[in-house]
Amino acid sequence: MKKAAPALSFGSALSHEPADKRIEILRRVGDSGSISQAARDAGVSYKAAWQAIDTLSNLAGGVLVQRAVGGAGGGGALITDAGKHLLAVAAQLAESRRQVLAAATAPAAATLPHTGLRTSMRNQFPCRVDRLEAKGQTVRVVLRLPDGSQLVSRITKASAELLGLKKKLAVLALCKATAVRVSPQSASPAEGQQLSGRAQRVSRGANGDEVSLLLAAGLQLVGFAAAGSGIRAKTPVSALIDESAVVIALPA
């Protein structure tokens, strides 16, 4: 008995369409019939282009591109029916979004970019790219928060290409609360990326205390301290965040 094909999930695949190049790359593959050509036209590496297609396929729950032997430009590629359907839906969403934003008043439209992102990550900070430090297949993205303080994210080179990161670009920095280690400020701070602030709220727990702290930039950061840390409201604290735990997103 033939198994039924898995249901496609275009909602997952398109939820970030305005924020990166994945849909653009898929569209260029359809136009050129080549992953290599699509990568060149989109200004990304061949590896990054395939990463984009693979990610979209995972999110959509179906194959969007098939390899075709003997194609020009390093091997051919064919858009599947699912891929064509996804592009059609993406075009409709883009037009609907354009109409909604055009109808919005200027003050309201200015707040919309940051409201469309749905994620479990509680820490979300608007910032700008200060510089990019490439090292092999990874890139350290140095970000600046509104008060000028620094936050660093370490991502892959392919991800930096797909996001089109460049100096002064406005982005969102995201981080899970469970990836933030909070401790009382001391004269000998731990090694690593740290942000300083003052505890606002503390929720005690047997396995650790959840701490909401206020940064100098006026931003709220949520993290966890060890049980029995002694942190109370108004206590000066430090938040240790690994660079690889900071995720970068582009406003929709």
Image: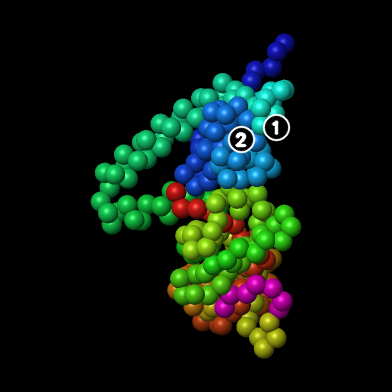
Total marks in image: 2
Comparing 85 with 124, the one in front is 85
Q: Residue at x 65, y 36 (%)?
A: 36
Q: Is residue 113 left or right of residue 154?
A: left
- Asked if the stretch drawn in magenta spans residue 193, the answer is yes
- From where the camera sits, is residue 8 visible? no
Q: Residue at x 64, y 20 (%)?
A: 5
Numbered circle sitting on residue 74: 1
Percent position of residue 246, x then y: 61, 61
In space, the residues marked 2 and 1 are separated at their CA atoms by 8 Å
Q: Quadrant of residue 57?
A: top right
Q: Is residue 204 above or below residue 26?
A: below
Task: Report which residue position mark 2 lands on.
Answer: 37
Percent position of residue 47, x then y: 69, 42
Numbered circle sitting on residue 127: none
Q: Residue at x 65, y 49 (%)?
A: 158
Q: Is residue 143 above or below residue 117?
A: below
For numbered disc 2, what is the local secondary structure? helix
Of all residues, the one furthest to the front in this rendering is 72
Pointer 2 with pointer 1, Cβ within 8 A: yes
Comparing 177 with 43, the one in front is 43
Q: Residues within 10 Å of mark 1 (few under 14, many from 20)?
A: few
Q: Quadrant of the N terminus?
A: top right
Lower position in the chain sequence, tag 2 or tag 1: 2
Amino acid marked by disc 1: Gly
- Asked if the stretch drawn in magenta spans residue 200, the answer is no
